[in-house]
Image: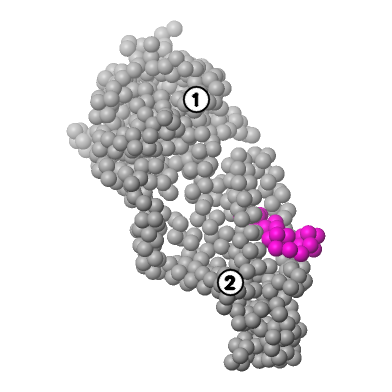
Amino acid sequence: MPLLDIQSLVVEYRTPKANVKAVDRVSLSVEKGHTLGLVGESGCGKSTLGLSIVRLVPPPGRIVSGQITLDGINVVRCSNEKIRRVRGKRVGYIFQDPMTSLNPVKKIRDHFVEMINTHEPGVSREDALKRASDMLQNLGILPERIDDFPHQFSGGMRQRVMIGLALALNPDLLIADEPTTSLDVIVEAQIIELLKHLKEALDLTLVLITHNIGIVAETADRVAVMYAGRIAELGEIGDLFEKPMHPYTKALLNSVPNITKKDQILSWIPGAPPDLADVPPGCLYHPRCPFVFDRCKNEGPQLLKHDNSMVACHLYDKR
Amino acid sequence: MSSEKPQGRILIWFLPALTGLVRRGLAGWAILIGSAIVAVVGVITVVSPWISPYDPIAINVGPILSPPSFEFPLGTNHLGQDMLSRVYSGGAIMFQVAILSVIVCLVVGVPVGLYASYAGGHIDQLASFVMDSIYAFPGLVLAIAIAAMLGPGVVNMALSIAVVYVPSYFRIIRSQVLTIKELPYVEAARMMGAKGSAILLSYILPNVIASIAAIATINFADAVLTAAGLTFVGLGLPVSTPNWGWDLTYGRQLLTSGAWWVITFPGLMVVLLALGFTLMGEGLSELLNPRLQK
């Protein structure tokens, strides 16, 4: 049984003008110990999907229908108190912007003590601090820096602290929502290395949300490509990179610079993603798709199994 | 850490703070000078029974309206009371009123501001409506109206000043909470499973405390001025209490007859105390911000 199982999840942002479906009938599952990469361009609903897993979609967003099961817990229906205990304890969350994700008036030690005591009130302050300094040491931060304030750390170190906080209670699942977007390339590589190392060492289950295909290629076991709130393609990492099927996936992979090819003009995807408040009929990708044919303009494709992967494209639907 | 003695920790904190203050430039000096002024006035007030040369409310201790002289350094008023003794002891009421009003403001304004603006929705709208209605009145006029209703007395004076000031606390806190509650570290706390009360008390409150301290000290300064003002218009305290406000009232009438000393010295004390609190507040808001510490 997978650790995380999402079945036809629909998340809507209800505004006076329109109901925007940020996540539309998404189904996926993550096995224990595996890493799922969730890729897509800005606004495709990947962060909203991540937030739904801990039921923290900000208003006016709400989960309209579907199922999320995390290790047997029904996330959509369970009580507020139960979901609060899931957050932090069962699911660790790492954010995009480490610069503002720590409380500026609290020392690093107090972040850890608070985190641990929220879920394990019995743990003494000394034990919590012990665990915190061990954790920092594992993450490559000198334990004596535990007495410093967040502003005394650099961006990369703050992200390490955030990772430490997220892992402080040995969660089953770690969700990293663009963990390196606001960091420079060298620090980004270090953080990714760290995540890979932790994943091996702690047998972590990881959901990695990113728009950086390179990071996914390095870390993930399976990849879900999202477009306009829907899953375009879902498959094993090798299949997806070697034999991409969905035209969007192909276009995404082609627009990554490749240093082994000589003087190639970088391709891009013409057009822009659809306005989710006013979606085109048929396949949401058809206005930008080079392989578009009549059926695409009228009928939305289903996510169907093809070879080892799942793909939502009429090109592969032989019915 | 726990083996350290608390006194030791206070000292360790205090000494670098003092030298640190000076290194922090203008803000540090502001706190230093402000707290020195308040401390000096405070000490004078506390020890006034022992250092006053005369009973501040006894009449005819000297000649009527004597100008400053060797025997009466600040002169005497029209009742023959010694002005030096009155200046020494007149601050007690000011401090009581100011401290009491600030306490009332803190007890009412801070929780209401924090909770209403964090909860948002109808609670926030209702609280904002009430506070804005109070805020719409000119402060001193409202204080006079409330003092007139409640009657004279230290507590009533403090209450009327508090009513005028609670909306300022509310507004400052609300504006800060509305920003802070959307910040990633509050969201991060929620992600980590923190309870609503924990988020409010340990993530939001510590981040608005610098503003609360700043407005509290400005509130102190204004309370001193308003207390003097209320007594000045006759809504403060009985004449039998030594009080700078009364000296101002009489001093104003006596000024035309050339007795400048009756109004000048108590007036200076009011200005000095208000200045001290204001300087403290200006500096304190910077000191309490950990991002500005070295």
Q: Which residue: 45% across, 25% down?
A: A86
Indicate the amino acid at tag 1: Ile
Numbered disc 2: secondary structure = helix
Residue at mark 2: B45
Which quadrant holds residue B20? bottom left
The magenta span reads B145-169
Residue at mark 2 to residue at mark 1: CA–CA distance: 57 Å
Residue B147 located within the stretch drawn in magenta? yes
Which quadrant holds residue B156? bottom right
Q: Is residue B1 above or below residue A57?
A: below
Q: Nearer the viewer, mark 2 or mark 1?
A: 2
* Residue farthest along the top direction in this orientation: A319
Q: Which residue: 61% across, 61% down?
A: B99
Question: Which percent across, then down, holds residue A190?
Answer: 25, 38
Which quadrant holds residue B222? bottom right
Front position in the image: A230 or B280: B280
Front position in the image: B139 or A70: B139
- Chain letter belonging to callout 2: B
Residue B85 in view, yes or no: yes
Front position in the image: B122 or B249: B249
Q: Which residue: 47% across, 17% down?
A: A73
Question: Which percent across, then down, holds residue B61?
Answer: 69, 86
Q: Are marks 2 and 1 on the same chain?
A: no
Mark drawn on residue A83: 1
